[in-house]
Image (tube, rainbow, N blue to C red):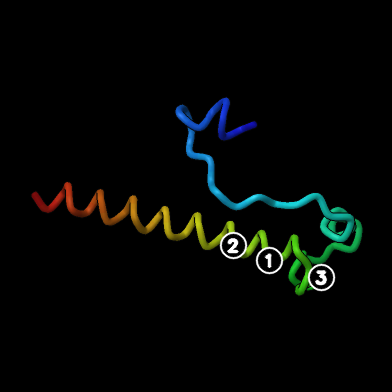
Amino acid sequence: SLRQNYGRIIKVYQTVIPVSVKAAETSTTGKSIYAYDKNGAAAKAYADFTGEVIKDGEKQRNRHETTLSR
């Protein structure tokens, strides 16, 4: 729904973070999802999302550096 309604206006990443009881429980434990349930689907999804954001940031930086060097 986000991609369909806003994908032309804002960057919407491909990774989908699943609804997870374990992820919700992390706020009451004070632990990260990686410490609380490192092998769970939510932890994997957050790691995938982080990778997407980093890759996108590197792409943006490279574009910016290329523009500046012209």
Single out the mark in the foreground, 1 or 3. 1
Any mark on residue 44, and which?
1
**Is 8 above or below relative to 12?**
above
Q: Do labels 1 and 3 touch, CB within 8 Å?
A: no
13 and 33: which one is in front? 13
Helix, strand or loop at disc 1?
Answer: helix
Label 2 sits on residue: 48
Across and down, in percent, residue 67 comes to: 17, 47
36 and 21: which one is in front? 21
Q: Do labels 1 and 2 touch, CB within 8 Å?
A: yes
Any mark on residue 37, and which?
3
Residue at position x 90%, y 63% in the image: 29
67 and 6: which one is in front? 6
Find the residue positioned furthest to the left: 70
Does 6 sit left or right of 67 as displayed?
A: right
**Is 19 above or below relative to 31?**
above
Q: Earlier in the sequence, mark 2 or mark 3?
A: 3
Q: Do labels 2 and 3 touch, CB within 8 Å?
A: no
Residue at position x 42%, y 53% in the image: 56
Q: Residues within 10 Å of mark 3 (few under 14, many from 20)?
A: some
Q: Could you tell me how far apart the alpha carbons at marks 1 and 3 are, in whole angstroms?
A: 10 Å
Across and down, in percent, residue 60 comes to: 34, 50
Helix, strand or loop at disc 3?
Answer: helix
Tell me which amino acid carries mark 2.
Answer: Asp
Helix, strand or loop at disc 2?
Answer: helix
Q: Could you tell me how far apart the alpha carbons at marks 2 and 3 are, in whole angstroms?
A: 15 Å
Tell me which amino acid carries mark 3.
Answer: Asp
Tell me which amino acid carries mark 1.
Answer: Lys
Any mark on residue 28, and which?
none
Q: In which quarter of the image is the N terminus?
A: top right
Q: Could you tell me how far apart the alpha carbons at marks 1 and 2 are, in whole angstroms?
A: 6 Å
Q: Residues within 10 Å of mark 2 (few under 14, many from 20)?
A: some
